[in-house]
Image (tube, rainbow, N blue to C red):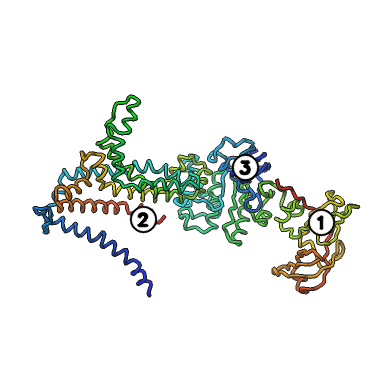
Amino acid sequence: MSRGRAAFLLLLPCAIALVVLFVLPQALMFAASLGRRSAYGGVIHGFDLANYVRAVQPIYLTILLRSFGLALATTVLCLLAAYPVAYWLGLLAPARWRNLLLVLVILPFWTSFLVRMYAWVFMLRTEGLLNLLLGRFGVAPLPLLYNDFAVLLGQVYGELPFMILPLYASIEKLDHSLLEAAADLGAVPFRTLLRVTLPLTQPGIVAGCVLVFIPSLGAYLAPDLLGGARTVYVGNLIQSQFAVARDMPFGSAMSFLLSLLVVALLFAFRRPLRASREL
Amino acid sequence: MRGAVSVQGVRKAFGEMVALRDVSLEVEAGEFLTLLGPSGCGKTTLLRLIAGFEEPDAGTILISGRDVAPLPAYKRPVNTVFQHYALFPHRTVAGNVAFGLECLGVARAEIGPRVEKALEMVRMPGYADRRIDQLSGGQKQRVALARAVVLQPEVLLLDEPMSALDLKLRKEMQVEVKNLQERLKTTFIFVTHDQDEALTMSDRIAVLNRGSIEQVGAPEALYERPRTRFVADFLAVRNILEATVESVAGGEARVRTRGGAAFVAADDGGYAAGAPVVVGIRPERITLDGEGGNAIPGTLDDEIYLGDRTDWRVRLGGETVTVAEGAATASRRKRGDTVTVRFPPEAVLRLEEPQAP
């Protein structure tokens, strides 16, 4: 068997999965987005851009922009919180504890995201754990739940492991002698961080940001449960089009636009992304 | 004195493992000193303590007369050439050499010329804009040297910098590093496990074994008169024999080895009649023809052909010794020949055997 044919056969399962799980659904969705809703929530196929015209109206663009802001804030906060953790895990933590500590990072995945969001509700609500504790010190109950703060908190909490793991992977690979070389050449620790550690762990930073930013863009559980659905994000909008408003064509159009946005972003950042694959 | 290093009673342990036990060493300003020893002897640990990457458990290190204990690595007036170079892969050659100057806050206009000069010094002009992954091992070595010497350190530390190079390149770099040191007149502390490298390059050599310095001296002194069994073994004294002193008289000691070979050694004052002793004889100090000195009959047992010379394994009763012979005379012999092994009493080195702590 020729090399070309072997490569073809080996890639076939992956190609089939991509077609069945990605290309086909996207095509179906795109087809639906060009149609109209029927009286009972079905799709009447057609060729009409009306849904897209509706989707770029200011009210929906505002929602999209808000989601973008949430995703950006989530990514930045995750990066700031995760970098020290990953740095400690990768360079400073005792080697024999490392695996256990990594298990702790991914341990939350053993519980459903939904359940964990409810746990936050119990912690944050007016009679919740935190306010109960604050009450002991004579602090009046704080409005911790059902606001943007709670949404952001839930997002950062949920996405943090996706930032820690790629950062850890690239920090752990960092050649320790490079840090010593920097110190040896007279770099104070902060300069070493800025000029050596950060540039060399850039692949991990890029990978982590992509892994956090993209799901955050379509987030709807945290806004729904912790935000009390008071503020609408694009994820909630799409979900409600399918589940509540029964307007599948419009929901499809919004979904398709969101996918396009993600692809456009990946394209815009293709250079650092390529670097993250090389290293 | 600028560039002098004084190590006083330094101890360092990593958990249970004692890397250095009570090491003291004086390195003179402008000297090329080599720390020589097998892996795990503590030589790299000593270098890292001087650089400031580790802290000693006890003892003091002075650089240029100043106690460096309170100084972190980035404030010490030393620079290091690392074993695997540790060049920054995200910077060009010039970017690597400029790194230390940038840390010092040297003006941009001044950095360029100084980097260029340093690259010329290591014979790498014109490589300024190359990426590190485009360089060969020898070139990386030179860039690592340039990056360290551009800062004009009081002491340059080199941690087995040649170990990744092939033999021919290593020989070239040895000469170059030695020349560089003579030009700069900077103190070099060089770590290696290669005795040839140490003998070629050093003004003085300190031999380390299991965390202690066994002997310090000029290459010739060390080669001619190794004091301990370990140093002798490490510097290729291949015949090390355990023996008993039979008698001492008239500046000569008569010894008998465990295997039964008896001969006379020049007395250095350390032989005592009836006491056990370890002696060493270099293979090249023993001849199979010659006259005078000790003469012991034996049989040629094995031949190890090495091109320019041949090593014979010669059986002397219950003892076997190695004799190195030049190519010209070796070709006349064959295995099984009866020979007379000869060596002068001065060729017998009395070796101490420090008790392991």
Q: Is residue B347 left or right of residue A148?
A: right
Please say whether residue B203 is visible from this viewpoint: no
Q: What separation in Å lies between label 2 and label 3 (alpha carbons)?
A: 45 Å
The chain letter for the residue carrying disc 1 is: B
What amino acid type is highlighted by mark number 2?
Answer: Arg
The chain letter for the residue carrying disc 3 is: B
What amino acid type is highlighted by mark number 1?
Answer: Ala
Q: Is residue A152 left or right of residue B229?
A: left
Q: Which residue is mark 1?
A: B243
Q: Nearer the viewer, residue A205 or A20?
A: A20
State the SS at label 3. Answer: strand
State the SS at label 1. Answer: strand
Residue B146: % across, % down: 54, 50
Q: Residues within 10 Å of mark 1 (few under 14, many from 20)?
A: some
Please give the label number shown on residue A274: 2
Q: Is residue B111 left or right of residue A221?
A: right
**Looking at the image, which residue is at 21% across and 54% down?**
A256
Q: Residues within 10 Å of mark 3 (few under 14, many from 20)?
A: many
Q: Nearer the viewer, mark 1 or mark 2?
A: 1
Does A56 appear above or below B328?
Answer: above
What amino acid type is highlighted by mark number 3?
Answer: Lys
Please give the label number shown on residue B12: 3
